[in-house]
Image (cartoon, grey):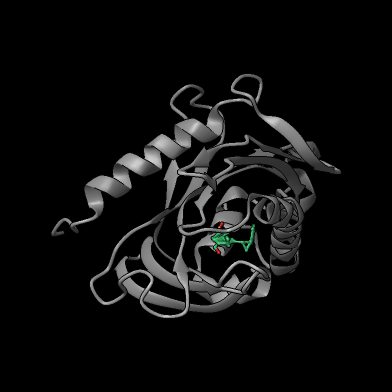
Amino acid sequence: AIEHRLWPEIEKITMEQLHYARLGVGAGGWQLFAEDGDMRMYRREEEADGLVVDPLKACHVVKGVTGHEVCEIFFSPEYRTGWEATLEDMTVVEKVSKDTLIFLQTHKRIWPASQRDALFWSHMRRVSDDQDPDAHDLWIVCNHSTEHPDYPPNTGKCVRVYLTVCLVCQTFIDPPKDEDEIKRENITCKITYCSVVNPGGWAPASVLRAVYKREYPKFLKRFTSFCIDQCKDKPITF
Ligand SMILES: CCCc1ccc(-c2ccc(S(=O)(=O)CCO)cc2)cc1[C@H]1C[C@H]1c1ccccn1
């Protein structure tokens, strides 16, 4: 296949994000800011040119779904309106390959900041765990801001945000007694979600931090509940 112009960047950023997601939160100034059941949400307070760009890392454990299923739902455009509450509009601008799409998304305005949009490539892949070959495979979705000639930034009503996001999922199977078939009650998915969103233009630090504190826990809970609901009556996809 002919290599797409974005392929080298996609490969580099995806593997960097995989490495970053697998780093623990012990070092590096992470502060726990939200907890809910098995979900732990951490952030670092960081600014770039006076704009809040607080990196976020969330760890969650969800029973009854596989990492492949969770990443498939996070990646696929057809499910997004079902779980992304802050979305106002979404377009698939380009289909790079079956596992790589370019999205343009408009998010609901957060008063008093102006409305934001995001243009990013989204890439999904299975990664075999080189450290522990008998561990189950990892699945990753990586979203990273990009440019596109037909969608220049800041031309309409929206301020363009710049984001890098990854969702890394690992499936664990607790084998059922005497070789029965694996049921959903025997599977657990360990999820790490990382995001850095540069708001792209001025927005008060206090407002942004309040929005992230409110929106990220809601987002991850809504997303994982949606996954459980979507998968519960379907055959398991490993
Ligand atoms: C001023 C910043 C506005 C703003 C821009 C962008 C995003 C955002 C974009 C993408 C992704 S994702 O994980 O790639 C899933 C695909 O949608 C998550 C978040 C969120 C907010 C704000 C709306 C807030 C928010 C924060 C956290 C989660 C959801 N929404």
User: 210 or 21: which is nearer to us?
Assistant: 210
Q: Is residue 167 visible?
A: no
Tell me where residue 161 appears, x and y as whole percent.
46, 60
Tell me where residue 159 appears, x and y as whole percent.
46, 68
Tell me where residue 97 appears, x and y as whole percent.
30, 64
Residue at 45%, 44% (x, y): give it.
Answer: 49
Q: Quadrant of residue 190?
A: top right
Location of residue 21 with respect to 96 vertically, above or below: above
User: 56 or 129: which is nearer to us?
Assistant: 56
Residue at 61%, 76% (x, y): give it.
Answer: 81
Location of residue 118 with respect to 167 vertically, above or below: below
Location of residue 28 with respect to 128 vertically, above or below: above
The total of numbered circles placed on residues is 0
Quadrant assignment for ligand 1: bottom right
Left or right placement of residue 17 versus residue 88 in this view? left
Q: Is residue 226 visible?
A: yes
Left or right placement of residue 139 versus residue 211 in this view? left
User: 78 or 151: which is nearer to us?
Assistant: 151
